[in-house]
Image (tube, rainbow, N blue to C red):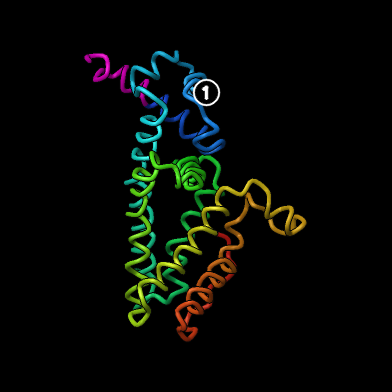
């Protein structure tokens, strides 16, 4: 037990988690084995077993490790939007505060949250697996920040309509974040998936109009510029 609490042991755990985060972001949960993680971390398979026991526990630790940082990033984005706007945010501005950080992170090589966001987007495709759902459900703390804002903006809209609209937006966002080139092919390279942030204005307007349409709300969004983020 002393080794687990030592500085060397803590460093080994971080190396393993770093490797797991990258592999899960590239291959998902089912496409990554414990041996793959050990090889990528340049440690013995026995060391991975010793520190975590199995792949599921590595996945749990990798998911929990940066969740607070992601939550704070989104919270800060809302705070920045509030500080730069007089009065209440519009629906478009609220959606922008939630969506833009993800697009920025996903399209910024070397960002400390890039592999984490890619990893979580890939793992959401495995949501139906019973052993993964409790851990993935913890990501709801991030969605909750968005849900609370939307509910305040649309007080006369039913919760079921708001949640369904959020589901459509988040499902699309998850795919966009992990898209390795479908956008490139679909648009014949007019738009590139590795520069998705350049399309943020169009994406946000599309999401806002869709949410308002589902809710039956009159369009009241402030138009955002198609500026890179």
The residue most toward the left is: 2
Q: Is residue 133 left or right of residue 195?
A: left
Q: Which one is nearer the viewer's eye here, 61 or 162?
A: 162
Query: Quadrant location of residue 83?
Result: bottom left
Main secondary-structure element of the magenta-colored stretch? helix
Instruction: Determine which quarter of the picture holds residue 17.
Output: top left
Give the side of residue 228 with respect to residue 85, left or right: right
Q: In the rendered view, does 148 fall on the left or right side of 40?
A: left
What number of labels is visible? 1
SS type, badge 1: helix
Residue at image position (52%, 34%) is 30
Q: Residue furthest bottom?
A: 218
The image shows residue 120, relative to residue 171, as above or below, that is: above
Instruction: Give coordinates of residue 21: x percent, y percent.
Output: 46, 34
Residue 127 against residue 24 in the figure, above or below: below
**Residue 38: image x %, image y %?**
47, 20
Observer-nearest of 216 and 188: 216
Which residue extends farthest right?
188
Residue occupying image coordinates x 68% and y 52%: 182
Asked whether residue 7 is drawn in magenta, I would say yes
Q: Which residues are magenta?
A: 1-13
Residue at the spot of label 1 = 36
Tell me, yes or no, whether the highlighted magenta stretch contains residue 213.
no
Residue 86 location, x and y as percent?
Answer: 36, 78
Q: Does residue 53 appear left or right of residue 222 in this picture?
A: left
Mark 1 Cα-neighbour bin, 10 Å: few <14, some 14–19, many ≥20:
some
Q: Quadrant of the N terminus?
A: top left
Residue drawn 42% across the image and 25% down it: 16
Tell me where residue 119 appears, x and y as whole percent.
48, 41
Q: Is residue 131 above or below residue 201?
A: above
């Amino acid at each position: 037990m002393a080794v687990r609490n030592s500085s060397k042991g803590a460093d080994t755990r971080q190396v393993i988690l770093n490797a797991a985060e990258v592999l899960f972001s590239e291959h998902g949960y089912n496409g990554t084995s414990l041996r793959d993680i050990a090889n990528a971390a340049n440690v013995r398979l026995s060391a991975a077993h010793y520190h975590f026991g199995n792949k599921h526990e590595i996945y749990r630790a990798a998911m929990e490790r940066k969740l607070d940082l992601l939550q704070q990033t989104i919270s800060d984005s809302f705070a920045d939007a509030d500080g730069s706007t007089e009065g209440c945010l519009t629906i478009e501005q609220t959606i922008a505060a939630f969506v833009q950080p993800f697009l920025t992170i996903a399209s910024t090589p070397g960002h400390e949250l890039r592999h984490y966001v890619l990893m979580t987007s890939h793992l959401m495709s495995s949501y139906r697996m019973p052993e993964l759902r409790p851990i993935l459900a913890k990501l709801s703390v991030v969605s909750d920040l968005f849900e609370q804002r939307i509910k305040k903006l649309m007080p006369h809209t039913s919760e079921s309509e708001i949640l369904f609209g959020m589901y459509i937006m988040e499902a699309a966002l998850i795919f966009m974040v992990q898209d390795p080139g479908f956008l490139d092919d679909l648009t014949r390279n007019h738009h590139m998936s590795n520069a998705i942030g350049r399309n943020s204005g169009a994406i946000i307007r599309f999401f806002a109009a869709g949410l308002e349409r589902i809710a039956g709300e009159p369009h009241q969004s402030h138009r955002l510029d198609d500026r890179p983020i």
